[in-house]
Image (cartoon, rainbow, N blue to C red):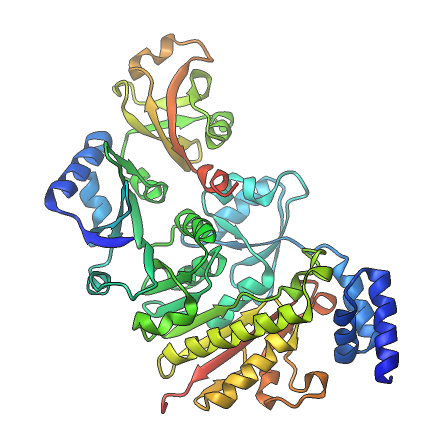
Amino acid sequence: MSRKELRQKAKTIAKEYEYLPYMIERYLALWGEEETLQFIEACEQPIKTSIRLNTLRIEPEKVIASLQKKKVDLEKIPWLTHGYYADFEGRSTPGAFLEHMLGYYYVQGVPSMTTVEVLDPQPDETVLDLAAAPGGKTTHIAQQMQNTGKVLAIEMDRQRLASLESNILRCGVTNALILRGDAKKVEKLGFEPDRILLDVPCSGEGLIPLDPTRKTSKSMADIRFCATREDELLDAAVNVLAPGGTIVYSTCSIAPEENEYIVDDILKRHPEMKVVPIPLDFGTPGYSEPFGVSLDESLKLSKRFLPHLHGSEGFFICKMIKEESA
Amino acid sequence: MKPELLDPIEWESIIESIDREFGQGITKKLLGKLTPMALVDRNWRNIYLIPTSWMNMLFEEPPKGFDYHLIGKQLGVMTKDRFRLSLQILPDLAQMTSKILTVSKRGAESFTYGRSILKESVVYLDFNLLRNQRVLVMDTDFHCLGIASLALDANRVGRLKPDDLVGKNLVDIGWFIRRLG
């Protein structure tokens, strides 16, 4: 398809499905017409509600029994230790259940839960969670660490701090410290964390199934703006990571400019950083040649969630280690 | 907020406040091997329990541009006039105290919506508890739902009408949801 034909096709599809044309143009270049249409169709479907059982508060069996007694249908998510699809059958919002108020579960998207399982934090480690609010991943990290060691949760936004604090208290997390500040200046903190989770603020292009306004709310300039910030944050995180440490970089964007391009740049600037395989069976490999641009081959080890392939919001997860010799 | 060690007088007053309401020696049990520390805001002091290994880190001045907002396990908040327990500590406290008011399923639901406790919801209340006593409010499955203050001596509850007030809601776990709108 010539450039002109691609533009014309994108314009037609964008008009029909109420997207901005630049988005469809990029999808066509990335996936071709058939997959683009599958993506668009999938974005019209609701995403299944999912929850994480919080073992800091209760044994999983007890909360499962309690929810099943209330006719909540639970289905285990195969690659997640405590993740379940939960059908509340419209009786009430998942947040209004007593078990939720008691911190027995956290309503959390499947990709978000997966991110922490990929990070695999261990008891007694020091873990940094950058851009931490509203706290789904912070509380999950604490759960994996069984409330030992320490989780430093950094958040800049004053209003979002309230939700972060509330969720930490509700979920019975006692090994967290919340610091308000700019994650880009994390070097000033003087920590060398064993693991870092950087679920970076992004353009949210993967969230179209949850928020249809995203079809028209962000321009290419917004994506470029986010990409610049993402690059700065990942660079700052890499600089403080302890040698031998692990970092997981994730976004809820499907744009390669915010994902593979960012990691590729980091790999060039930081030869001590290596992308490593993710030993969990989910998603599809990241791209090493998006839009015909050749990137580091190891980016195929990163993973993507896509609405049309996995029935979830779009998401990118990349696991890297900092080599000891550095 | 600035981390500070508690001076002995302040810590004694917190111990006195918790032990008076929930039983002698309770605060010491809640403390365990942790150390009390405060994060100081303008009008109140948030009291946290932290591992001693964190102390050196917290004594250092936080780097410019960073500010502590939560450290470890929240015990409660010291305001000008009194100490208020945190919701986070209540599940631990529930294992240690007998100052408990058990409510029916309907009463539990109503309580988590911020309402107070009426006679018709009371399932169990120790006969010896007195007016203004703080009690943990539990449902019949022993879930801790919050704290109430008794509106009358427990031995008078039997004389009340079903819709008379027994316990005034001081704090409940529905706050986690209401707080975020």
Q: Position of residue A307 (x, y in %)?
A: 71, 65
Q: Residue at x 76, y 71 (%)?
A: A22
x, y percentage for residue A278? 54, 78
Asked if one can make out residue B35 in the rendered structure from this viewpoint, the answer is no
Q: How many marks?
A: 0
User: Does residue B175 lie above or below B148 as drawn?
Assistant: below
From the viewer's perspective, tell me whether residue B135 is left or right of residue A85. Answer: left
Give the answer, above or below, for where A88 lies relative to A230: above
Question: Observer-nearest residue: A234 or A246?
Answer: A234
In the displayed structure, does residue A126 sit left or right of residue B36? right
Residue at position x 36%, y 83% from top? A243
Image height check: is A171 above or below A110? Answer: above
User: Quick check: A104 left or right of B158?
Assistant: right
Left or right: residue B17 compared with residue A114? left
Q: Position of residue A41 (x, y in %)?
A: 80, 62
Q: Picture quarter containing residue A85?
A: bottom right
Rendered location of residue A9, percent (x, y): 87, 73
Q: Quadrant of residue B89?
A: top left
Residue under the point 79% across and 76% down: A28
- Taking depth in this image into account, of B119 and B67 the one nearest to the observer is B67
| Residue A119 seen in render | yes
Give me the residue at 43% from left, 23% from top.
B116
Given residues A291 and A309, the one toward you in this image is A291
Query: Which residue is farthest front?
Result: A221
Q: Is residue A321 above or below residue B59?
A: below
